């Protein structure tokens, strides 16, 4: 089996994207894995700090590792949105394949300084682990929004600049970059998410030379996904859509099975809803529809 690094480089070359989907429980993981396996595509499972607290850092690793080994399948694990050096260490030492050190809300100088420390330690400890950093603040919560998060980069002048991105990558040595290009974490309640700045994505690709990650994928238009992937995005993060699918399935189960009290039977509808959302997204990211 190829490494995650090799799968990402392959996606970058072929102008497709690997889907990154967050989980909070086994039902979500089951739905995501079934979708990826059906389409025979690599997939990344992500857990933020809060999600790792819910599932357990070592538990999450064992669940994904078991699927990888049992089915000889390219399913990988990322420590998503990690804000402290201690939590980075925890994930790396546990055995995660990749980590996202998120200091995007800090000043550029602070972000560079702290990210350099993380990169130096990871390279010394487990050099095979991929290190991602966020440059530009795009909000921090995968929820349904009624307004733009305070401080989020939505105006053109606030998006990640190619010049700053090139400096950031050169000075920190990160493997992957998550820029602010019009994307936001979460979804708007009664409106589509903002359009992506596709030209900016292409400029960032050329300036940095590293694969780029699109966060806040939930709610983005299909045409924007396709254009972003064609212009340098190699990984797309989806979380809010997964949470909505999980809830839709659970609400359906509670209505249709009012007397059922067996948790795994109620969760079957959540698994099904998650699976369908992931299949649709993976097919789009890989030019299969």
Image (spheres, helix red, strand yellow):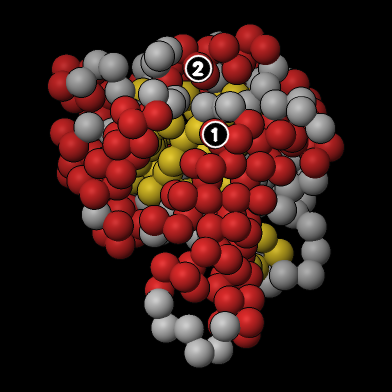
Percent x, y of residue 174: 39, 21
Q: Earlier in the sequence, mark 2 or mark 1?
A: 2
Dividing the picture into quadrants, the one containing residue 201 is: top right
Could you tell me which quadrant the C terminus lies in?
A: top right
Q: Is residue 157 visible?
A: no
Dividing the picture into quadrants, the one containing residue 257 is: bottom right
Q: Which of 279 and 138 is in front in this view?
A: 279
Q: Is residue 190 visible?
A: yes
- Secondary structure category for the residue under label 1: helix
Question: Pointer 2: what residue?
Answer: 7
Say above or below: 92 vs 90: above
Could you tell me which quadrant the N terminus lies in?
A: top left
Relative side of 176 to 59, left or right:
right
Q: Which of 49 and 39 is in front in this view?
A: 39
Percent x, y of residue 57: 24, 48
- Residue at (40%, 29%) from the top-left corner? 71
Instruction: Name the residue at the bottom extreme.
Output: 259
- Residue at (60%, 50%) from the top-left corner? 275
Relative side of 175 to 231, left or right:
left
Percent x, y of residue 252: 63, 76
Label 2–label 1 contact, CB within 8 A: no
Relative side of 178 to 146, left or right:
left
- Residue at (52%, 19%) from the top-left corner? 8
Say above or below: 205 vs 110: above
- Secondary structure category for the residue under label 2: helix
Question: Pointer 1: what residue?
Answer: 37
| Alpha-carbon span between mark 2 and mark 1 | 15 Å
Please tell me how crowded label 2 is: few (under 14), some (14-19), or many (20+) other residues with Cα within 10 Å.
some
Please tell me how crowded label 1 is: few (under 14), some (14-19), or many (20+) other residues with Cα within 10 Å.
some
- Residue at (63%, 26%) from the top-left corner? 17
Percent x, y of residue 249: 60, 68
């Amino acid at each position: 089996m190829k490494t995650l690094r090799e799968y990402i480089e392959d996606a970058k070359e072929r102008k497709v994207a690997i889907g990154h989907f967050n989980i909070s429980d086994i039902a979500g993981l089951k739905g995501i894995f079934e979708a990826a396996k059906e389409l025979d595509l690599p997939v990344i499972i992500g857990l933020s700090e809060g999600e790792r607290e819910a599932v357990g850092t070592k538990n999450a690793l064992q669940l994904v590792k078991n699927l990888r080994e049992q089915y000889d399948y390219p399913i990988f694990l990322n420590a998503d949105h990690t804000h402290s050096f201690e939590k980075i260490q925890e994930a790396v030492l546990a055995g995660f394949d990749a980590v996202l050190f998120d200091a995007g809300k800090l000043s550029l100088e602070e972000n560079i300084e702290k990210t350099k420390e993380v990169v130096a330690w990871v390279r010394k400890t487990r050099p095979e682990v991929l290190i991602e950093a966020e440059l530009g603040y795009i909000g921090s919560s995968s929820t349904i929004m009624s307004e733009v998060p305070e401080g989020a980069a939505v105006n053109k002048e606030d998006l990640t600049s190619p010049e700053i991105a090139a400096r950031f990558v050169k000075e920190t040595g990160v493997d992957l970059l998550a820029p602010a290009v019009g994307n936001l974490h979460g979804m708007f309640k009664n409106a589509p998410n903002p359009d992506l700045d596709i030209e900016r994505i292409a400029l960032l690709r050329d300036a940095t030379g590293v694969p780029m990650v699109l966060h806040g994928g939930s709610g983005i238009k299909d045409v924007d996904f396709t254009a972003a992937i064609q212009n340098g995005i190699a990984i797309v993060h989806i979380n809010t859509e997964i949470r909505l699918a999980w809830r839709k399935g659970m609400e359906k189960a509670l209505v249709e099975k009012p007397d059922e009290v067996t948790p795994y039977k109620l969760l079957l509808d959540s698994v099904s809803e998650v699976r369908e959302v992931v299949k649709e997204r993976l097919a789009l990211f890989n030019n299969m529809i």
